Image (cartoon, rainbow, N blue to C red):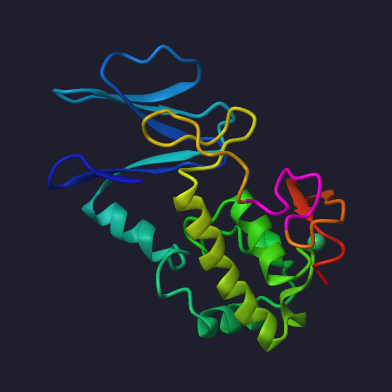
Amino acid sequence: MLFNVDRDYQLLTHLGMSGTWIISPTKLIEKHQHIRIKTNKEFLTYVDPRRFGHAYFFNKEEKEKYFKRLGPDIASKDLSVQFLTEVFQKYGERELKPFILDQKFFAGSGNYIANEVCAHAGVLPQRKCKTLKADEIKAIKKGFQKVLKGTLKGGGVTFSGGYRDAFGSKGSGLSHLVVFHQETCGLCKKTKVKKIVLKQRGTFYCPHCQV
Ligand SMILES: [Zn+2]
């Protein structure tokens, strides 16, 4: 989320896993408030119970420098099959899921997105990038599109006090997710979802659908 503070300054926040901006007519009464902005009409409050989010206050130069270090936005056309093929080749030793959480390559990615992308692509999260075949890379690209579409439709994801939309209402929940915090895989609808920890992050996959 990028806010223009005035012509020269900008405030950027990465919501991390549980961060959310809430718009309210009066001062919000809620724990875990980290930033509060008062406009002439309402309050904008950044709430982040798990503190995985980040906030940056930039001038123009700092902003340009920062964005140069970031990879393509996962929702943009720049996240192409060609881009994926190149980075998977170049960073072949990295494991797929932790890699697609890396903001230097996949700006805007998050833990549930990375889990869900692997599931939709039919690829195990711990696969080394160099082992990915051309059709799997295409499936990963499609997976990003599918997951991002579901996220927008569902109005954010809700889990253990997590995501909400900007008006503080909880999203339609986990209904569009297939493995993340799921008991049974939403794709084959029969296999129990496995949970492991990969590079310190909760990782979910279906041992039947993902190879
Ligand atoms: Zn499955």
| Image-quadrant location for residue 131 | bottom right
Q: Is residue 143 above or below residue 181?
A: below
Q: Quadrant of ligand 1?
A: bottom right
Residue at 63 percent across and 63 percent down: it is 117
Q: Is-magenta flag for residue 84?
A: no
Specify whether 26 is left or right of 200: left
Specify whether 13 is left or right of 3: right
Name the main secondary structure of what is drawn in magenta: loop
Residue at 63 percent across and 77 percent down: it is 139
Q: Is residue 49 above or below residue 16?
A: above
Residue at 77 percent across and 73 percent down: it is 128
- Residue 105 can be seen, yes or no: no
Q: Depth check: give the residue in front, 104 or 167.
A: 167
| Image-quadrant location for residue 38 | top left
Q: Is-magenta flag for residue 185?
A: yes
x%, y% of residue 121?
68, 71
Specify whether 168 is left or right of 11: right
Write the start and end of the magenta stretch as one range: 177-186
Residue at 57 percent across and 36 percent down: it is 158
Specify whether 163 is left or right of 192: left
Quadrant placement of the C terminus? bottom right
x%, y% of residue 186?
73, 55
x%, y% of residue 144?
55, 66
